[in-house]
Amino acid sequence: MAEILANGVRLHVQRLSPSGGPRPDSPLVVMVHGMVMDNISSFYFSLGNSLAHAGADVICYDLRGHGRSERTPDGYGLANAMADLSAMLGAVGVDRPVHLVGNSYGATMALSYGLEFTDRVASLTLIEPPFLIEGLGAEMARSLAQVLVGLSDAEVEQWLEHSAGRAVTRIARSAQSLLRDTSIADDMLATEPFSPERLAQLDVPVLAIYGANSDIIDQAEGLAKLVPRCTLIVLEHHTHAVLREASDYLRTLMRWWLFQRDTPVPPYTRMPGRAFATPDWVTRMIPPSDLNSPGKVDSRVNGADLGTSP
Amino acid sequence: MTIQYTVASERHTASERHTASGEVSTADRAVAEEQVLGEVAALLRDVIGEEYVVDLEITMTTSFNTDLELESIEFVTLADRMRERYGETVDFVGFLSDMGVDEVINMQVGQVVAFITDCLLEPKGAQS
């Protein structure tokens, strides 16, 4: 399986099964990656193959405009993303509730999907979801602005042109094109905030995971307070890139969540010397000298004219 | 001697290379590995699809990262193509299940080739 036409968009889909194929009672897990600098590969390598090997029936896909899916000029709002997901699941013949797993924006989308289509969801796993009752759209647009700023920097351009290497350059060029040539930033800015009333009625088990050193860790408690059946896991020494940083533990945690939820939560043991303070996706993309200069980034955020506050 | 077992319908010929004790001779394994290397290299060139790789010699010690500068999503495509080619005989899900993305990209082509060869040469009935 590779390409599916869903909601009028060509989506790249990978279905991963245990050896011998999934059983009728295998949990069906759908993974939704993050925005702009992310694609199917993050979940495919961190959790996809691991959970399939453990017995799950796993579907990973590229969101529209990302990875190997079609890059449409517009249609990047949450409603579009949810319609794409519903259509994709229909196209591959899913006829039972799924365990939806999202990372970053993908987690925000998964939560929205769970609120909108509760009967289609068996559980939600939300890894570092941007979660705000007020100003969610502005927050997500601000994140995109930061990426655009980094990619627009003259030094970064030099670096990409001459020494970043093929893989990083391809990722960066793809992100530049997505941000400059599509409506994704405007669509993100239009994101509606979550309704506390609807969150309070969400009758689905939710596993929320944040890094204690994440730049959005202050949003974790709000989520856990508002969602009734939420298990919140905060990992010390980790950042917004916890999926990549702590993928070994997240594999253990997800096996517990899918197969052994009536037992105690598996303990987390940090690997000695492994502590993260700076977002990994940022350091992989932009030279640290540009990243760690908040004033410079902030001024350029305004310059990006996304209507957001620094 | 040519061993053709890479197409699903011909996969049985791999097990015909076993001796009565179930062992595969070193010579037969070397031939099998060379065959698989050629196939994986062809898939890699197709997945990368850029001029720089057309004439690049891909060997068992070629690194996906430092030599080929493969993007992680290109490895996803490669795995998909290998799965199409070798079918369920080769359990790529199991192979990749314990590896992080950095481990995968830092592999040498030979590690994938050896895994595929092991699966193809595994005696019938020994596969889980």
Image (cartoon, helix red, strand yellow):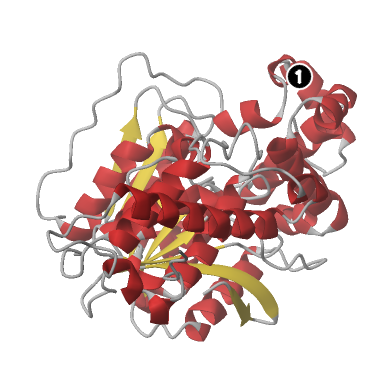
Residue B78 sits in quarter: bottom right
Query: Which secondary structure lies at badge 1?
Result: helix
> How many marks can you see?
1
Quick check: A153 above or below A73? above
Q: Quadrant of the C terminus of chain A?
A: top right
Chain for disc number 1? A
| Residue ID for mark 1 | A290
Residue B86 sits in quarter: bottom left
Residue A88 sits in quarter: bottom right
Q: Residue at x 61, y 67 (%)?
A: A81
Q: Position of residue A218 (x, y in %)?
A: 47, 32
Q: Position of residue A263 (x, y in %)?
A: 9, 49
Q: Position of residue B30 (x, y in %)?
A: 41, 49
Asked if residue A108 can be seen in this view, the reply is: no
Question: In the shown orientation, is residue A199 left or right of residue A143?
Answer: left
Task: Report the front residue among B11 and B27.
Answer: B27
Question: In the shown orientation, is residue B127 left or right of residue A65?
Answer: left
Q: Residues within 10 Å of mark 1 (few under 14, many from 20)?
A: some
Q: Residue at x 40, y 78 (%)?
A: B10
Quick check: B91 above or below A272? below
Kind of residue indicated by mark 1? Asp
Q: Position of residue B1 (x, y in %)?
A: 45, 64
Task: Report the front residue among A60 and B18.
Answer: B18
Q: Quick one: which residue is furthest to the left in this view?
A: A263
Task: Report the front residue among A68 and A297.
Answer: A68
